[in-house]
Image (spheres, rainbow, N blue to C red):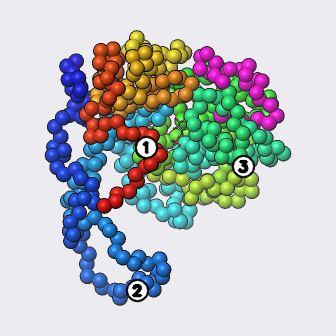
Amino acid sequence: MATDPVNPQTDAARRTTGKVRPHQTQNEGLVFEKSSPGKRGYKLPELDVPPVNVDELLGAAARKEKAQLPELSEIEIVRHFTRLSTWNYAIDLGMYPLGSCTMKYNPRVNEWVARIEGLAEAHPYRPDHLAQGQLQVIDLLQRCLIEITGMDAITLQPAAGAHGEFTGILLVRAWHESQGNARMKILIPDSAHGTNPATAAICGYEVENLKSNAEGGIDLEALERQVDGETAALMLTNPSTIGVFESQIHKIADILHAKGALLYMDGANMNALVGKTRPGDFGVDVMHLNLHKTFSTPHGGGGPGSGPVACKAFLEPFLPIPVLVKNEDGGMHWHYDRPQSVGRVRAFYGNTGMFIRALAYILANGPDGLRQTTEDAVLNANYIRKKLEDVYELPYKTPSMHEVVFSDKRQAAKGVKTGDIAKRLIDYGFHPYTVSFPMIVHGALMIEPTESESLEELDLFIEAMRAIAREVEETPELVKSAPHSTRVSRLDEVQAARKPVLRWRG
Ligand SMILES: *Cc1c(COP(=O)(O)O)cnc(C)c1O
């Protein structure tokens, strides 16, 4: 590979960080700085109704002076935001290997169906008898997800994974209370995603840490010791955040159930399981899914997401209201009279646009396609593992599922940390992998390619990672001061968190 030491000219780098970019030659200032008085991007028609007295209408809330808004023409605004959009990395530009995030391609056909007028414009207050098409879409998605997870019942209301966890643990709590004792604590392995302990705490539970064994799985003896009459549930991610399948999952479920505790599965990593095995068959009582990971609905940039919660039949009475029920005539309606329900967790029925996209993905793939997807995701992760394991340290030798976790042990000996390697990867035209997570791996590099990537793209990524490993040996300063090709280089992360500047001041 021909490299210029500062700006690597790989195919991938050229794609995102090529030196000459036409939009760079234009004024890159802030929108406020481009403002000049009197410019307008719109023209309103003459007022043809009696004017409203704003002071009368709004009282004290009425604005006393004019808002200081930038004044620009339409084309200046269009160029400004279009230019900003090109400064971001996106899954539509290249591989996005953030581990645990499953940044897969969002098929365009999903976007097309989500925009079908009758679905996209459906008003949530539309009466059920006029919304039968939409209710059928929701019902079919529910049935597909129940089939995929092997569970008995589901709610699509939660707006994200963490919100799904919250809803699932509310079900756990409501069930224990119905048995006469809410119990006090929730067990969480040390490899867990940070949202798990946060969920347990916000639901009023004490969080008890469970140590992983040498293979990165649950230590059954420790579990046996720690589960008692106060344990409400274990929250377990499977495959775990180091990409390892919990092969003892049946025994884990038995240990919990023998003492009246439940098994919650964080299903954010279902991309490794769909079509191969089902949580409902291996002892899970309640779980969430991330439609915006496994089922290809868009994510990043703050949503909207969707985190359905699936459960076994004994938890069904506690699901959020409303639930979808079949009429005698074959139609459907939303049912609200559920005395044991934990109540609503979100306005209306959830992010329905995400449901349509996820259903399109599921139907377009079909059972065999979904299984193939899982196999390709696992194959891609293992291909990267095999091609990089001689240059990056592999802390757990257990077979990888959908993601592979390396550590920076060898590079750290040269003073280069996982965060430095990630920043150098930007110069090579890739979004960084997940840095320093999971915490049980010191200096983690967590890589999840997903099934979306071609062999060519995987090879470009591998080439970049190997080139960086060589740079660490030969010119470590180059890596430690990366990125070199971006508009801003290293930001002061501490100041950015402690003293964020969130608004423009003239
Ligand atoms: C992404 C993720 C979550 C949280 O999902 P959000 O939709 O971001 O709230 C929880 N657990 C795991 C393992 C995840 O990867």
| Residue 183 visible at all | yes
Residue visible at 16% across and 49% down in the picture: 26
Numbered label attached to residue 495: 1
Q: Inspect the magenta stretch and tell me whether residue 219 lies in it.
A: yes
> Which stretch is magenta?
211-235
Residue position marked by numbered label 3 in the rendering: 317
| Label 3 environment density (alpha carbons within 10 Å; few <14, some 14–19, many ≥20) | some
Instruction: Work out which residue is located at the far bottom of the displayed protein and give it.
Output: 50
Residue 273's place in the image compared with 74, above or below, is above
- Residue 182 appears at what percent x and percent y? 78, 44
- Residue type beneath disc 3: Pro
Marked residue nearer the N-terminal end (2 or 1): 2
- Residue type beneath disc 1: Gln
Residue visible at 58% across and 55% down in the picture: 346
Q: Secondary structure at mark 2?
A: loop
- Residue type beneath disc 2: Asn
Q: Inspect the magenta stretch and tell me whether residue 407 lies in it.
A: no
Quadrant where the N terminus is found in the figure: top left
